[in-house]
């Protein structure tokens, strides 16, 4: 959508008017500053504005952003500015936040000519963010192109913004239904509102913001990790030069991202923070709607390094996991000691070290929680086995070993022993069982060693695999599979079968088949001894297969 000559002239006059105000009110203080100028207030949160790249008056902390700078100082921030380039890492490293406004350069600025970011400056800013700094970028794309006659790609904020997957567009965001009072349709002064203001720390208690009579530009996002937090609504679109976004495409206005240990906020205009009263209603832009709240939220979020934030979150997460472990009656003393070391480093502001120590505590907590799950599963299986009278002595012994290992932080051993306890419980012998009970409680007896006595019937030879036969104990019949030899056992003989019951097939996989009356019927102790040997044999075979 092209703008007519009257609109262009209006913009030119607006910019010229702003510059004249600056020259009258603050030219001396702005024009004579060199180097880095520090505020009187000192705090552990330090904030640096860039004024070294021919930015216009409304990007200066004692002119267009004077009230915003005052609000930051009132919150305890040290607000400084750099007026003498180049930007180096040494100049940035002692600050928490660096603000880089887009330049509005050329014949309408204080200085003639364009002062672009150098490659070395870009590297320095990128390293600053990677090391935990916060970066606030803002500017209008259309004004850069109009007043520098350079491509939008060369804009200061785009030279660095592309490193984080965000680009400022050469356009204006329009909204035909939600406009700042006094704006006509076709003028780019939208009111951004919920739900197109997403939940994020920078938008806490922010419901409506506006650039007032300014003309905000949209952003293009090229990295999926970038989060658009404020965008135009359902009928917003972009125009002026080209058409980046049509109605319904919600042109992005403010985006945030995290990079290594640092954070970035990118806004398509600074109009919402300005110390000017564009509506002549006695209220400066900064104090319209929720503009001030948004601005302060942005700085507060950027001021907390990602290293500090992630360490804090991780420490809290581990603390929550410890509480959960205590509810499972797990001894957490070792994990608490590890977490205490992380908390000590955090208090000393050694956030990277705190994060690493918290990671170690988290691994211990996660291992303990996983191991506690193994132990719970084994205990559940033991309880199930007990309910049908199974001998779980060996399983309980193994489970006690597992609990001891868990309390001592030997998680691998604890899981192994808990797994053994589970298998021992699953295959725990229940001794002599009636067939009617075996069928009625099939799922409880599944995989367990049972002893069934009765009359052998329907013997069949399975070539190369032994025998199948039926066993009748007077309460019912069950199928038996046996891979050994039957010797002199014949149809109608009384036999005792010991083996694992398979609920899925309703059969007993016999390990032994013994003729009753030959040497007498074994007593209960003998039955359990046989079953115990079978279980041990099973575990040994399982370990070898594993």
Image (cartoon, rainbow, N blue to C red):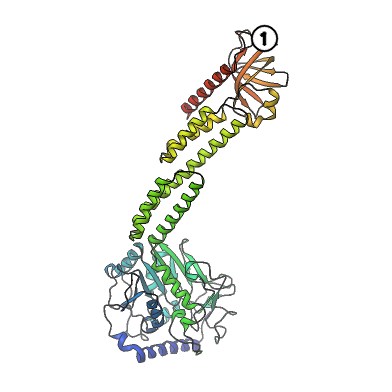
Percent across and percent down for residue 331 are: 45, 44
**Observer able to see residue 281:** yes
Q: Quadrant of residue 12?
A: bottom left
Residue 72 to residue 546: above or below: below
Q: Quadrant of residue 76?
A: bottom left
Percent across and percent down for residue 374 are: 51, 39
Which residue is labeled 1 in the image?
490
Does 158 sit left or right of 452 as displayed? left
Does 510 sit left or right of 228 as displayed? right
Q: Quadrant of residue 135?
A: bottom left
**Observer able to see residue 356:** no
Q: Residue at x 46, y 35 (%)?
A: 402
Number of marks drawn: 1
Residue 203 to residue 33: above or below: above
- SS of the residue at dot 1? loop
Q: Residue at x 44, y 47 (%)?
A: 365
Q: Residue at x 59, y 74 (%)?
A: 235
Residue 361 to residue 74: above or below: above
Percent across and percent down for residue 52 are: 31, 78
Q: Residue at x 44, y 58 (%)?
A: 313
The foreground one among 35 and 144 is 35
């Amino acid at each position: 959508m092209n703008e007519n000559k009257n609109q262009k002239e209006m913009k030119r006059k607006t910019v010229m008017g702003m510059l004249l105000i600056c020259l009258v009110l603050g030219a001396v203080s702005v024009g004579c500053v060199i180097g880095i100028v520090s505020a009187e207030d000192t705090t552990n949160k330090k904030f640096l504005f860039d004024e070294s790249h021919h930015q216009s008056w409304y990007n200066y902390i004692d002119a267009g952003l004077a009230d915003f700078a005052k609000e930051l100082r009132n919150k305890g921030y040290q607000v400084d500015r750099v007026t003498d380039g180049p930007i180096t890492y040494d100049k940035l490293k002692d600050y928490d936040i660096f603000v880089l406004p887009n330049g509005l350069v050329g014949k309408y600025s204080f200085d003639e000519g364009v002062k672009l970011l150098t490659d070395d400056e870009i590297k320095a800013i990128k390293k600053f963010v990677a090391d935990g700094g916060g970066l606030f970028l803002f500017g209008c794309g259309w004004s850069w192109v109009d007043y520098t006659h350079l491509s939008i790609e060369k804009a200061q904020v785009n030279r660095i913004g592309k490193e984080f997957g965000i680009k400022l567009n050469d356009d204006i965001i329009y909204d035909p239904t939600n406009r700042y009072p006094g704006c006509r349709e076709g003028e780019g002064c939208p009111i951004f509102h919920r739900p197109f203001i997403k939940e994020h720390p920078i938008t806490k208690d922010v419901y409506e913001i506006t650039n007032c009579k300014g003309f905000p530009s949209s952003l293009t996002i090229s990295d999926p990790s970038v989060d658009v937090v404020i965008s135009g609504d359902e009928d917003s679109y972009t125009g002026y030069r080209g058409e980046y976004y049509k109605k319904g495409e919600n042109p992005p206005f403010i985006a945030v991202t995290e990079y290594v240990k640092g954070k970035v906020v990118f806004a398509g205009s600074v109009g919402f923070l300005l110390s000017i009263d564009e509506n002549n209603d006695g209220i400066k832009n900064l104090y319209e709607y929720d503009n001030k709240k948004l601005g302060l939220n942005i700085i507060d979020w950027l001021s907390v390094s990602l290293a500090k934030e992630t360490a804090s979150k991780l420490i809290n997460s581990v603390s929550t996991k410890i509480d959960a472990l205590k509810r499972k009656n797990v001894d957490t003393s070792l994990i608490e000691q590890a977490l205490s070391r992380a908390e000590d480093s955090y208090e000393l502001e050694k956030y990277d070290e705190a994060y690493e120590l918290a990671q170690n505590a988290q691994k211990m907590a996660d291992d303990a929680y996983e191991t506690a799950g193994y132990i719970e599963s084994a205990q559940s299986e033991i309880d199930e086995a007990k309910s049908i009278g199974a001998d779980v002595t060996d399983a309980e012994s193994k489970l006690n070993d597992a609990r001891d290992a868990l309390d001592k932080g030997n998680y691998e051993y604890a899981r192994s022993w808990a797994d053994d306890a589970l298998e021992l419980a699953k295959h725990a012998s229940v001794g002599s069982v009636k067939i009617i009970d075996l069928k009625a409680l099939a799922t409880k007896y599944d995989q367990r060693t049972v002893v069934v006595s009765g009359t052998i019937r329907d013997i069949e030879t399975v070539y190369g695999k032994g025998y199948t036969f039926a066993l009748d104990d007077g309460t019912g019949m069950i199928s038996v599979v046996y891979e050994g030899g039957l010797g002199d056992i014949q149809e109608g003989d009384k036999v005792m079968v010991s083996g694992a019951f398979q609920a899925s097939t309703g059969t007993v996989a016999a390990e032994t088949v013994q003729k009753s009356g030959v040497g007498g019927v074994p007593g209960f102790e003998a039955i359990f001894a046989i079953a115990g040997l079978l279980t041990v044999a099973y575990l040994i075979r399982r370990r070898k297969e594993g």
